[in-house]
Image (cartoon, helix red, strand yellow):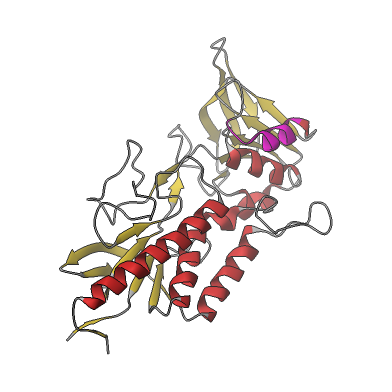
Amino acid sequence: MVTTDADLLILGAGPAGLTAAQYGARANMRVLVIEELAPGGQALLIDALENYPGYIASVPGTCRSGFELAQDMHRQAASFGAAFITQTARSLHKEGDIFTVCLETGDTLRGFAVIVATGAKHRILDVPGEIEFTGRGVSYCANCDGPFFKGKKVFVMGGGDAACDEAQFLSRLASQVVLVHRRDRFRSQKALAERVLRNPHITVRFNTRLLEIRGANTVSSVLLENILTGESYEEAGDGVFIFVGTIPQTSLVPSVEKDENGYIITDQEMAASIPGIFCAGDVRACPFRQVVVAAGEGAVAAHSAVAYIDRIKEQGDWGAAL
């Protein structure tokens, strides 16, 4: 009898992975979630989930945070029987009908199906000073580092949902927020963009790009360039928050089909090009990346994975690992 450690292995514990864990466990599957950091993924960076269905603030400005949602989703999945381990997965391979995940510790875990919910990581600008001052004035998480800049002047780089949302959060802490975007308009949702433009604590610089981050031990200024005129100028400030997109984390599944940007392509059942691998969340090719979308995809991926596992089990004699 061939044994497995779980029926369903889930890589990543963001909203997609946590939802998949809940739905898989509720379907009476042995679910094991592998997450290298804390459950929640990028949702942990969201200050206020004002657009998540059912999250209505009783008092304006008191919406629950992404951290609170992540805690609830984690507890919920665990209550249905999903197991969690904090480890870094180094490789994934398939032999016959069994998937094996190799961990950083050298241990291995085996299952019948895998849901890849590894998400995406922040893209860097790759300008002089960015790496040197990371953790010393340069940050990619306003919720994490914003309190260190209370009463100070900060720059936010980007023009999408994340940049606008984080600029809003920082405007409640910093004395001044300068939002720098290389285009002539925001890429964010209209409601977010309008809120930023109305905020008296946020100064918006369109058609502007960052050339360099300067300082001694910590950030003290930035070098900016007006794209239309070519004029460059130095401006003093205490911090730089960068939100210019993400890079999908697909190193564990190099052989599955991906789009031109490296995101995993799936069908409507969230199935990837290799049978038994399903995908959900920010790592998947999708035109709209939101917490609610990731959760929905996680539910579909789990439903599809359960059906796949049932078919595999009908074909052979399988047992649980000792």
Q: Is residue 176 left or right of residue 106?
A: right
- The region drawn magenta spans 187-197
Q: Residue at x 72, y 32 (%)?
A: 194
- Where is the C terminus found, in terms of image quarters? bottom left
- How many marks on residues? 0
| Between 207 and 296, the one nearer to me in the picture | 296
Q: Is residue 10 left or right of residue 216?
A: left
Q: Quadrant of residue 179?
A: top right
Q: Overall secondary structure of the magenta stretch?
A: helix
Q: Residue at x 50, y 54 (%)?
A: 294
Give x and y (percent) for residue 129. Answer: 48, 36
- Verify whether residue 85 appears in magenta: no
Q: Residue at x 76, y 46 (%)?
A: 172
Q: Quadrant of residue 188?
A: top right
- Verify whether residue 195 appears in magenta: yes
Give x and y (percent) for residue 239. Answer: 62, 40
Q: Is residue 239 left or right of residue 304?
A: right
Give x and y (percent) for residue 119. Answer: 43, 53
- Where is the N terminus found, in terms of image quarters? bottom left
